Amino acid sequence: MNLLRTLALVSAAALALPLRADPVTAASTAFTPENLQAALSRDLASHFSLEGDFQVTLTRPFTPGRPVGDGWTLTVDDYPLSAESTMLVHGEIRDADGPQDATFLLHATLWRDAWAVRLPLTVGSAFDASRLETRRCDMLREHELLPAAVGDSSYIFARSVPVGRMLTWHDLSRHQQVRKGQLVEVTAADGLLVVSMKVLALEGGVKGDTITVRNPDSNKDFSALVTDENHVQVQF
């Protein structure tokens, strides 16, 4: 199920990212806790590609070594591996008189709409948004909740879920258009020439997956692209 989460959410936040971000400029904004928190929120939301209402607050006050003038910039050069409710980040505050090292202990929230069950769900049934409703939740505190942006005809409900419960990633699975052991239609195209035949699926897959199939007459295995229900394609 972690794979589903990675594919839907596009969770690339912890992959190879720059070690040092471009500075966030506060222009003529005065250096206040509120403005510092706003700058940190913008920087971290951009770094982790977060969707939703993301805000951070300073868990403990930050006191610079000297007064910070207007036109200051914030640069974060040491991020945590992922966005969490509590984060420690390091960087610098720079103004006309030069940089100052800064370490911030932060509390973060990420408010998004998530799915809640409005009508009973049965295992194996197709995803149906009309049986659900949205609720605003802090996704950093409740990691497993399913964002309302996720859910279409490629999903099925993996287990029965009672009314009133929040939907989680464990409650969904992808609907496989091709299942292992099935005889499926393969279309092979070479320019204007198109040939179709039946092959045995040696593995299951959803639309867009490349799977291994076998010609039952020759016992030859080859790769094919899942394009539709019980249908794969080979392009020469």
Image (cartoon, grey):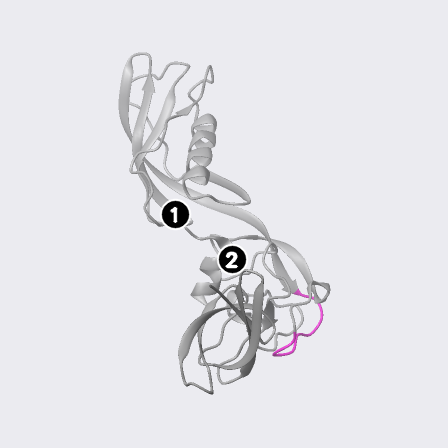
Real-space Cα separation, disc 2 to disc 1, in angstroms = 24 Å
- The answer to whether residue 186 is magenta is no
Residue wearing tag 1:
86
Instruction: Tell me which amino acid carries mark 1.
Output: Thr
Q: Where is residue 165 in the image (x, y as percent from the top left)?
A: 61, 68
Q: Nearer the viewer, residue 89 or 47?
A: 47
Q: Categorize mark 1 by other alpha carbons within 10 Å: few (<14), some (14-19), many (20+).
A: some
Q: Nearer the viewer, residue 186 or 24?
A: 186
Q: Which of 158 and 206 is in front in this view?
A: 206
Q: Where is residue 196 in the image (x, y as percent from the top left)?
A: 57, 75
Q: Residue 20's quadrant in the figure?
A: top left
Q: Position of residue 141 (x, y in %)?
A: 47, 55
Residue wearing tag 2:
8
Q: Categorize mark 2 by other alpha carbons within 10 Å: few (<14), some (14-19), many (20+).
A: few
Q: Are marks 2 and 1 in contact (CB under 8 Å)?
A: no
Magenta segment range?
117-125
Identify the main secondary structure in magenta. Answer: loop
Is residue 143 something one can see in this rendering? no
- Give the vertical position of 160 relative to 235 (above or below): below
Q: Residue 177's quadrant in the figure?
A: bottom right
User: In the image, is 225 to the left or to the right of 128?
Assistant: left
